[in-house]
Image: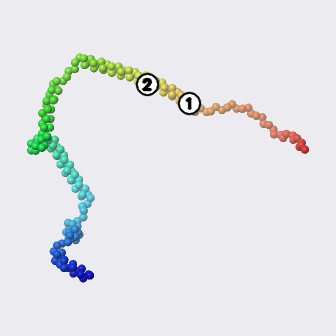
Amino acid sequence: MSSTLSSTRSRFSAGRWVAAPSIDAALHPTDLDDDRLRRKRPSFGKRASRALTRFLIAFCIGVAATLAWQSYGDAARELIAISSPQLGWLAPQAAAVGQTAPDTIAPAASAAPVPDQQQINAMSLGLAGVRQSVDQLAAQLAASQQQMARDIIKLQAAERDILDKISAPPQQPAAAPARKPVALTQPPQAPPVR
């Protein structure tokens, strides 16, 4: 059976596979003698510095775009609105802000409302009422502070009395009169009962 397989392989693969490289050869770079594929990865420091450089470039581009938009934003909006009708909503917003701003500032500055005498009287009465209530609150606060000070003094006096009672040595009872020693004598024995 091995002879049939080998003849089958040789018959089908006689000239076909020799001309075309195998797919596996393209997938294995170690088989190739190219120095570029055999190089090692760059060190961590080089990769980190490249990443930092890329980040700084992106950051600078963002800052430049922001500054350009702040400087030329209105002109850019108009240019976009003119070039594309679908984005026409950009232009009226910039134009409306530019046209209405001077109109609203000028009348407000020239026509400052002048309060009439009734409003001034009402405000002064209101301020007098507020002043009176603040004075009442201040008097109540002072009275409560004085009461609190008296209570603290009473508590301190009671604390001193308790500490004096605790720290004083206990009173010893009066000494009892000395007893006379009693001689131990044996009482006479009664005759045994029979």
What percent of the width, then of the height, locates residue 53?
Answer: 21, 53
As drawn, the residue found furthest toward the bottom would be 3
What percent of the width, then of the height, locates residue 29?
Answer: 22, 68
Count of number-bearing discs: 2
Q: Label 2 belongs to which residue?
A: 145
Task: Tell me if residue 8 can be seen.
Answer: yes
Residue 40 vertical placement versus 132 (above, below): below
- Which quadrant of the structure image shows residue 164? top right
Sequence-wise first label, 1 or 2: 2
Residue 59 vertical placement versus 123 (above, below): below
From the viewer's perspective, tell me whether residue 39 is left or right of residue 173: left
Crowd rating for badge 1 (residues with CA inside 10 Å; few <14, some 14–19, many 20+):
few
Residue 180 vertical placement versus 37 (above, below): above
Residue at position x 16%, y 75% from top?
A: 16
In the image, what residue type sits under mark 1?
Answer: Ile
In the image, what residue type sits under mark 2?
Answer: Gln
Q: Label 1 belongs to which residue?
A: 162
- Which quadrant of the structure image shows residue 136? top left
As drawn, the residue found furthest toward the right would be 194
State the mark number for residue 151: none
From the viewer's perspective, tell me whether residue 145 is left or right of residue 24: right
Quarter holding the N terminus is bottom left
From the viewer's perspective, tell me whether residue 22 is left or right of residue 81: right
What percent of the width, then of the height, locates residue 21?
Answer: 18, 72
Cα gap from disc 1 to disc 2, whole angstroms: 26 Å
Task: Tell me if residue 72 can be seen.
Answer: no
Residue at position x 45%, y 23% from top?
A: 146
- Which quadrant of the structure image shows residue 98? top left
